[in-house]
Image (tube, grey):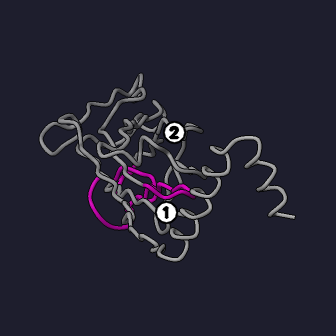
Amino acid sequence: MLRSTLRQMASISGRSFLAIGLTMGAMAAWSSAAKADVIYVNNPAVETVTFTQDAQGQVGTAIPLSSSTGLSSTVIGSLNLKSNSVNGYTINAISANNGTLNKGVGVGVPTIAYTMQFPALTPFNGAIASGAGTAIDDVSALNVTAASAAGLDRNVSIAVAPSEVTGKESGDYTDTVTFSLTTK
């Protein structure tokens, strides 16, 4: 049947037969000489989180509190995160003092509770815990900004209620907060 089809095409146009013959010949030559190779590349996982503290809030430049107003939401620094995980990531904030600013170290020292604000897709505004910490950002897909070379910058703020300041001893109160990034 193929021969009769080719003869019919040849009688219609010599060029058609010639083109088909060349195409079929080229395919036959290509398929016998072709070799496929798979190319593999590896894009390494990027998982970094960096906190840059504002000048205010560092040793020697403590943030002033007021017994009448406490501390309204005040930026204490910027968090830069980089993650190229297709499944997303979780940012945890881990407080050394279970979400309180302490005057000194040990049991029974004066404390001032504070809340942290983090402008994530679902903004976080609450207390942070010790131990495993508290998830302040939870992303379930690739964030292209976080996957970029510059990463994603977000301000970190804290607030103190006036009731936490009233009746407390004067002096410096501190907490150490560790930020961690876990890919999914």
Horizontal side, residue 19 vs residue 30: left or right: right
**Total count of labels:** 2
Find the magenta span and give its range.
84-111
Residue drawn at point x = 54 percent, y = 41 percent: 124
Q: Quadrant of the C terminus?
A: bottom right
Q: Residue lying furthest front in this view? A: 11
In the picture shown, does residue 106 fall above or below 55? below
- Name the residue tied to disc 2: 120
| Relative horizontal placement of residue 15, taking residue 29 as reference (left or right) | right
Q: Is residue 8 above or below residue 34?
A: above
Measured from the top left, where is residue 40 in percent x and y? 42, 71
Q: Position of residue 79 (x, y in %)?
A: 34, 44
- Residue type at numbered disc 1: Thr
Instruction: Check the picture and name the quadrant holding the N terminus.
Output: bottom right
Residue at the spot of label 1: 183
* Marks 2 and 1, how far apart at CA: 16 Å
**Position in image of residue 67 (x %, y %):** 38, 28
**SS under mark 2:** loop
In the image as oriented, which residue stretches furthest toward the top?
68
As rendered, which of 23 and 103 lies closer to the eye? 23
Under mark 2, the amino acid is: Ala
> Label for residue 5?
none
What residue sits 66% from the left and 45% below the top?
Answer: 14
